[in-house]
Amino acid sequence: TVRAITLIEIEGRAADRIRKALRGFPEIVALHTTNGRFDFVAELQARSLAAFDSLLGRIRQVEGITATETHILLASDYPGGAA
C-alpha cells in the first residue's frame, strides 16, 4: 500500500465544487482545508505505485486545481510504538 499527503492549490472560489469532486475518489481517505499557499490537504492511499500514479493524474485533471505537491509517507511513528 502506498500512503501519501497531497497539498492542493485551487483557483478562486472553486472550493465547494472541488471538494465535491474529490469526495468521489475512494483513495482519498481524508480531506482537510488549510491556510497558506495550498487550500486542501488530501490523505491518499493506493494499492500500488501504478495505482498511485494514476490517482495523482486523475486528481490533477479536476477542473480548478491549479497545483499539487505530494509527499509519500515512508514510515509512521506512533507514540509508544515502533515505526
Image (cartoon, rainbow, N blue to C red):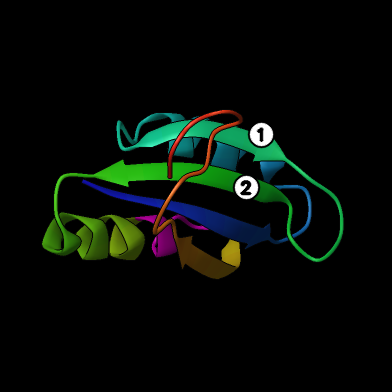
The answer to whether residue 64 is seen in the rendering is no
In the image, taking residue 48 as reference, residue 13 lies left or right, namely right
Q: Classify mark 1: helix, strand or loop.
A: helix
Which amino acid, mark 1?
Asp
What predominant SS class does the magenta segment belong to?
loop
Instruction: Give the labeled residue for mark 2.
Output: 41
Horizontal and vertical percent for residue 66? Answer: 60, 69
Of the image marks 2 and 1, the number of the one nearer the N terminus: 1
Q: Nearer the viewer, residue 77 or 25?
A: 77
Which one is closest to the eye, mark 2 or mark 1?
2
Question: Which residue sits at x=14%, y=54%?
Answer: 48
Q: Is residue 3 above or below residue 81?
A: below
Instruction: Give the labeled residue for mark 1.
Output: 16
What stretch of residues is rendered in magenta? 59-63
Which amino acid, mark 2?
Val
Q: Nearer the viewer, residue 44 or 1?
A: 1
On residue 7, the disc is: none
Q: Quadrant of residue 24?
A: top left
